[in-house]
Image (spheres, rainbow, N blue to C red):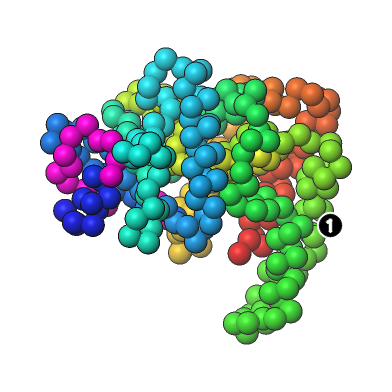
Amino acid sequence: MNENLFEVLRAFRLDAKPVSCEPYGCGHINVTYLAVTESGRRYILQKINNNTFRDVAGLMENITAVTEFLRTKTDDPRSVLTLVKTHDGASYLHAQDSYWRVYDFVEDSICLQLPETDEDFYQSAVGFGTFQQLLTDFPAAKLHETIPNFHNTPDRYRALLETLERDPMHRAAQVQPEIEFALARQAEMAALQNALDAGELPLRVTHNDTKINNILFDRQGRVLCVIDLDTVLRSPCFNDFGDAIRTYANHGREDDENDKNKTLRDVIVQDLKSKNTEARYQIAAQNAIAANKDNSISRNKKAWEKTVKELKKSLGVKD
């Protein structure tokens, strides 16, 4: 085991001496390791990407507050991530010019990288919908904005226009059709942000990265736990719904370099059109809608209809 990792682990309240620590998982932002102690107990060690999450203290305050709140809603310790504190009682460690945290490993769990069946899609939707529902009465104003303007589509367009004017890599001429596609929809894509700015949509506690690999399932395919809470922010609940459709309906991985793999899953598209299956998916949707009960039904319905379209297009102008 890398001695530097061993030194980091010793700073946390593990149950015994660590004996191994190896790279783990398929995450893109943070660096994740699986640590095992002499007793055989397992932990997740993560090196937090402080280039992406510049306010690490605020980030960890968010995660601590949300997980402690969720723990009051369940009797199953596996249904909520459990942070392991440092010997000083902190939720994270600043050492070796890096930021570190440790979670209890969720035993007997499965993490899927892509939906294998439409039931996987449905169960994950239930998981994220339930996550929002359980946090309905959480004080959303308490959360730090760890990624400013994360779902602010007009701000994405501002950044796009500024970059186009500078054209620092001299590539704009090569992607004119894509640029024209994005710019032709600029006014339309501001709809949800405008409604939010006008006070027509409330801010709720949302996950903001509703990929299926941010859900842990049990061996029977039921949802155990929502993970990767770094992007938990205040935003309209519709963003989670739109982001889920974007990822679940895609045949390819998020980082797939082969564009031919990035096609819609027909079975999911057809299921969403089916009245029978639509009723099933609405079970999950109703959880999120319940979090917006102070809005009219018609206003919620219009926002849901806009969300998938806006999220799909706004992702095309990110970064």
Q: What stretch is highlighted in magenta?
A: 11-28
Q: Can residue 13 be seen in this view?
A: yes
Q: Which of 213 and 277 is in front in this view?
A: 213
Left or right for 248, reference 240: left
At x 71% / y 47%, what residue is drawn? 309
Q: Point out the residue furthest to the right here.
A: 198
- Quarter of the image for residue 214 reads top left
Pointer 1 local density, CA inside 10 Å: few below 14, some 14–19, many at least 20: few
Helix, strand or loop: magenta stretch: loop
Residue 13, magenta (yes or no): yes
Which amino acid type corresponds to the residue marked 1 in the rendered image?
Answer: Ala
Q: Position of residue 7 (x, y in %)?
A: 23, 51
At x 45% / y 64%, what residue is drawn? 257
At x 28% / y 44%, what residue is drawn? 11
Dot 1 falls on a residue whose secondary structure is loop
Tag 1 residue: 187
Residue 129, magenta (yes or no): no
Q: In this view, does 146 lie above or below 66?
A: below
